């Protein structure tokens, strides 16, 4: 495993991002107690900023967990915007529903339980796609959803440096799958792609072509 950022840099950035939102703090505490993976605060702030800049009307999130990343998206949406949360675990979506209700964001969200690849296909004109599902599914997911993206859509994918394993000779299904996905996104004529080496690597891709 390769350290993607120096822990001292992470500590400095976290010190800059003091948070007083009780719902976010509760979710961060829940994730830590359960050792449940979330994008964490530094990436959450990036998601919020990108959403404010993009002002999407439709956000589809493939792999929502219990709603941490989707909460950052929803807070940044305009009144016309909507986010679709998709997770295969009903208890995760149930927790997300409660968080959104407590935050008065319920009317900006649609909550779906099931296979993200299947459910995402039900939506057309996706302005912002967030991918945080099983890593071996990334390439299949973007292949399936690309025709459904709106003009100038933004794709965001988490964990695309995968603990630094993509830069080493590591032979396991998830590392190989992430590497194939990254190479696809960087060589595809449909996207202009970059990776922000923040936390575990955040891939950003701008859709260049119309379907």
Image (cartoon, grey):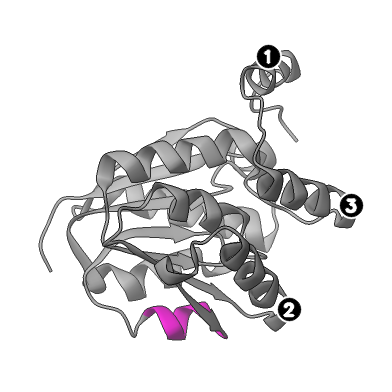
Return the disc, 1 or 3, that comes first in the chain's sequence.
1
For residue 141, above or below residue 177: below
For residue 63, above or below residue 15: below
**On the image, numbered disc 2 is attached to which residue?**
91
At a point 30% along the width and 58% down the height, the residue shown is 79
Residue 97 shown in magenta: no
Residue that protrudes farthest toward the right in the picture: 33
State how far apart marks 2 and 3 are (Cα).
16 Å
SS under mark 2: helix
State how far apart marks 2 and 1 are (Cα).
34 Å
In the foreground, 204 or 125: 125
Does residue 97 appear left or right of residue 193 in this picture?
Answer: right
Q: In the picture, which quadrant includes the N terminus?
A: top right
SS under mark 1: helix
Range of residues picked out in magenta: 114-120
Residue 93's disc number? none
Q: Where is residue 72 in the image (x, y as percent from the top left)?
A: 51, 48
Majority SS type along the magenta span: helix
Return the disc, 2 or 1, that comes first in the chain's sequence.
1
**On the image, numbered disc 3 is attached to which residue?**
33
At a point 63% along the width and 53% down the height, the residue shown is 175
Q: Quadrant location of residue 68? A: bottom right
Q: Quadrant location of residue 124? A: bottom left
Q: In the picture, which quadrant includes the C terminus?
A: bottom left
At a point 69% along the width and 40% down the height, the residue shown is 163
**On the image, numbered disc 1 is attached to which residue?**
12
Does residue 88 appear left or right of residue 60 in this picture?
Answer: right
Q: Position of residue 49 (x, y in %)?
A: 40, 36
In the foreground, 170 or 165: 165
Return the disc, 2 or 3, that comes first in the chain's sequence.
3
């Amino acid at each position: 495993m390769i350290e993607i950022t120096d822990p001292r840099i992470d500590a400095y950035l976290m010190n800059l991002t003091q948070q007083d939102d009780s719902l976010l703090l509760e979710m961060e505490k829940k994730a830590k107690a359960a050792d449940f993976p979330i994008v964490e605060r530094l990436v959450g702030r990036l998601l919020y900023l990108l959403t404010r800049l993009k002002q999407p009307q439709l956000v589809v999130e493939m792999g929502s967990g219990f709603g941490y990343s989707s909460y950052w998206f929803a807070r940044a949406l305009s009144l016309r915007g909507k986010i679709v949360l998709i997770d295969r675990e009903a208890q995760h979506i149930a927790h997300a529903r409660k968080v959104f209700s407590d935050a008065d964001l319920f009317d900006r969200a649609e909550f779906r339980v099931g296979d993200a690849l299947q459910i995402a296909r039900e939506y057309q004109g996706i302005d912002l796609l967030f991918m945080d599902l099983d890593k071996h599914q990334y390439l299949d997911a973007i292949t399936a959803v690309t025709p459904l993206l709106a003009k100038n859509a933004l794709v965001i994918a988490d964990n695309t440096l995968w603990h630094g394993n993509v830069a080493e000779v590591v032979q396991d299904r998830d590392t190989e799958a992430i590497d194939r996905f990254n190479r696809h996104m960087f060589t595809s004529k449909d996207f202009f792609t970059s990776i922000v080496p923040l936390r575990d690597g955040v891939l950003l891709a701008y859709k260049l072509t119309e379907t």
